[in-house]
Amino acid sequence: MSQPQTIDCRGLQCPEPIMRLATAARKLPGDGTLLVRADDEAFPST
């Protein structure tokens, strides 16, 4: 397993974090993992 790719979306408002996540996900290899850093209240945390 490789290290997760990190996307820093802090300071951005929706829908920009979602758009960046979608773009990164399309480029991600099949077994890849994304780590998203976001502070917009509209971007859910899990």
Image (cartoon, rainbow, N blue to C red):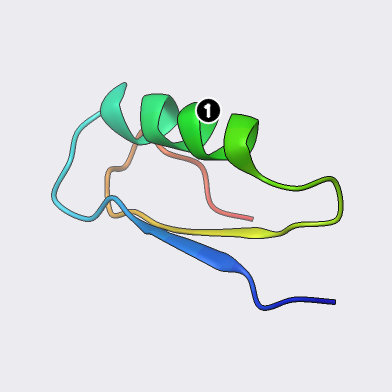
Quadrant containing the C terminus is: bottom right
Horizontal relation, residue 9 to residue 34: left or right: left
- Local packing at callout 1 (Cα closer than 10 Å; few below 14, some 14-19, many 20+) is few
* Number of numbered labels in the structure image: 1
Where's residue 15, x and y in %? 31, 21
Horizontal relation, residue 22 to residue 38: left or right: right
Where's residue 13, x and y in %? 20, 33
- In the image, what residue occupies the spot 63% across and 70% down? 4
Residue type pointed to by label 1: Ala
Horizontal relation, residue 22 to residue 19: left or right: right
Quadrant containing the N terminus is: bottom right
- The residue nearer to you, when weighing 34 against 11, is 34
Where's residue 45, x and y in %? 54, 52
Mark 1 sits on what residue?
22
- In the image, what residue occupies the spot 42% across and 38% down? 43
| Element class at badge 1 | helix
- The residue nearer to you, when weighing 5 against 11, is 5
- In the image, what residue occupies the spot 75% across and 57% down? 32
- In the image, what residue occupies the spot 66% across and 78% down? 3
